[in-house]
């Protein structure tokens, strides 16, 4: 699962559920958080500050990558790829806000895009992990 994250967002508490999801399914699930400052300047910190915030406030043990751009002219190649793959499965403009979740199978195929408002421990996520 690849997630665009932010530390000063209304969805920031999802870090706790992402960690719960990771702990519950870490035998078959890898989560990588990608901090992004694309929406409302909600991720202004450095990579070090972001990592410390996640660990201190939410006990995050899953992988946190370096801050990237997930949308716009400077979009990171990974998120450009994910956006293109989402279009192939009928999801136009998949990244509408922080905490959009891309679920990818063990072969690198995009299974689904889980919207930012959908909580990580919801049945919409769990059904893919059973």
Image: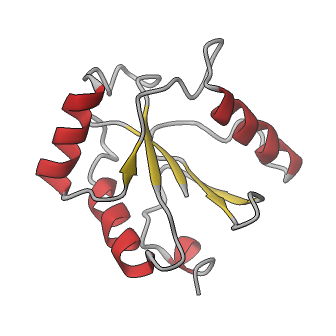
The number of numbered discs placed on residues in the rendered structure image is 0
Q: Is residue 110 left or right of residue 18?
A: right
The x, y position of residue 58, in whole percent, is 19, 56
Q: Is residue 92 left or right of residue 23?
A: right
Task: Name the quadrant of the N terminus.
Answer: bottom right
Q: Residue at x 34, y 47 (%)?
A: 11
The x, y position of residue 74, in whole percent, is 61, 14
Q: Residue at x 28, y 59 (%)?
A: 61
> Of all residues shown, which one is farthest toward the bottom?
130
Q: Nearer the viewer, residue 33 or 128?
A: 33
Q: Is residue 81 left or right of residue 46?
A: right
Q: Is residue 16 above or below residue 48?
A: below
Task: Name the quadrant of the C terminus.
Answer: bottom right
The x, y position of residue 19, in whole percent, is 32, 64
The x, y position of residue 85, in whole percent, is 80, 45
Q: Nearer the viewer, residue 119 or 7?
A: 7
Q: Specify the quadrant of the image occupied by residue 105.
A: bottom right
> Of all residues shown, which one is farthest toward the right?
88
Q: How is the image coloured?
A: secondary structure
Q: Residue at x 43, y 29 (%)?
A: 36
Q: Is residue 112 left or right of residue 12?
A: right
> Of all residues shown, which one is farthest toward the top?
73
Q: Is residue 110 above or below residue 3?
A: below
Q: Specify the quadrant of the image occupied by residue 112.
A: bottom right
């Amino acid at each position: 699962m690849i997630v665009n994250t932010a530390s000063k967002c209304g969805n920031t508490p999802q870090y706790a559920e992402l960690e719960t999801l990771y702990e519950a399914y870490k035998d078959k699930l890898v989560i990588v958080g990608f901090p992004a400052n694309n929406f409302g300047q909600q991720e202004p910190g450095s990579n070090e500050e972001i990592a410390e915030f996640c660990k201190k406030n939410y006990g995050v043990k899953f992988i946190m990558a370096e801050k990237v751009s997930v949308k716009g002219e400077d979009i990171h190649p990974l998120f450009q790829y994910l956006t293109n793959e989402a279009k192939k499965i009928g999801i136009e403009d998949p990244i509408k806000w922080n905490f959009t979740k891309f679920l990818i199978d063990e072969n690198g195929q995009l299974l689904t895009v889980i919207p930012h408002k959908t909580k990580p421990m919801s049945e919409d996520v769990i059904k893919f992990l059973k």
